[in-house]
Amino acid sequence: MRAMILAAGRGERLRPITNDIPKALVEVGGKSVLEWHLERVAAAGIERVVINLGWHGEQIVEHVGSGERFGVDIAYSDEGDDILETGGGIHKALPLLGDAPFVVINSDIFTDMPVPDVRLREDHLGHLVTVPVPAGLDHGDFNIEDGLIRRTDNPRYTYAGFAIYRPELFAGCEPGRFSVVPLMFAAADAGRLSGSVYHGRWADIGTPERLATLRERYRA
């Protein structure tokens, strides 16, 4: 299995912190969130990692290089100034990800979650890891019924930024900028998206206030 870390975005919600650095290089607990993710990917035995580049992407290349010091081989999918969002970014990187299911990790989360060890059913297009709706949010994204992701009126779980996708999820997609969310919804509605809940340490670091709270809690 291969992994992709989504790191191209501008980190708008984290400004002004991300004015001069990419969000993946924001530090918590003495190292960048990107380093935390690379260490967990390596611990799961995944050797090939794709990172998409956009906002200040050259800093990411300088920081983690080939991936050798993490025990992984990093390939870069450079989007330049035309940042393609989640779906477009994954679609562009598909030639680097191979024909088998692959892991996708958002770079703006902080967690002790291990890379999920999930084997997709043959008829499933993916698997989402969720967390209970965090304090401060009015509602979640999904429910899980019989192991499947469902969209309901009272969703109890929030997408955790960890997923496994088959390349076939992107069949018929055209190159360009688009979100992966409509593809997730369509797979869920078709009963082809499984899900699980993680109850350990997890946080969205999408705002300066959340980041400050995390840094205070997990000071190295």
Image (cartoon, helix red, strand yellow):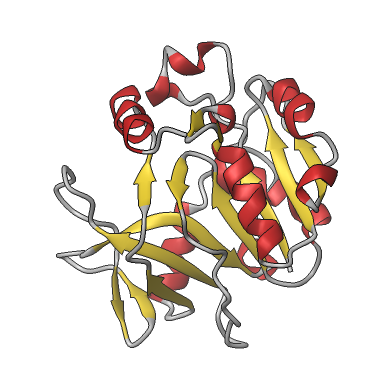
Q: Is residue 118 left or right of residue 98?
A: left
What residue do we see at 18% from left, 45% from top?
137
Question: How many tags in the picture?
Answer: 0
Q: Is residue 120 above or below residue 208?
A: below
Q: Position of residue 6 (x, y in %)?
A: 60, 43
Dividing the picture into quadrants, the one containing residue 216 is: top left
Task: Assign the N terminus to one quadrant of the image.
Answer: bottom right
Q: Position of residue 84 (x, y in %)?
A: 62, 36
What residue do we see at 57% from left, 11% from top?
20
Q: Is residue 174 left or right of residue 216?
A: right
Regarding residue 171, the answer to whether it shows in the image is: no
Q: Return the residue nearer the eye: 12 or 133.
A: 133
Q: Position of residue 184 (x, y in %)?
A: 46, 62
Q: Position of residue 40 (x, y in %)?
A: 61, 56
What residue do we see at 62% from left, 30% from top?
83
Q: Is residue 94 left or right of residue 142?
A: right
Q: Is residue 50 left or right of residue 127?
A: right
Q: Is residue 165 above or below residue 105?
A: below
Q: Is residue 73 above or below residue 190?
A: above
Regarding residue 42, the answer to whether it shows in the image is: yes
What residue do we see at 79% from left, 39% from top?
76
Dividing the picture into quadrants, the one containing residue 88 is: top right
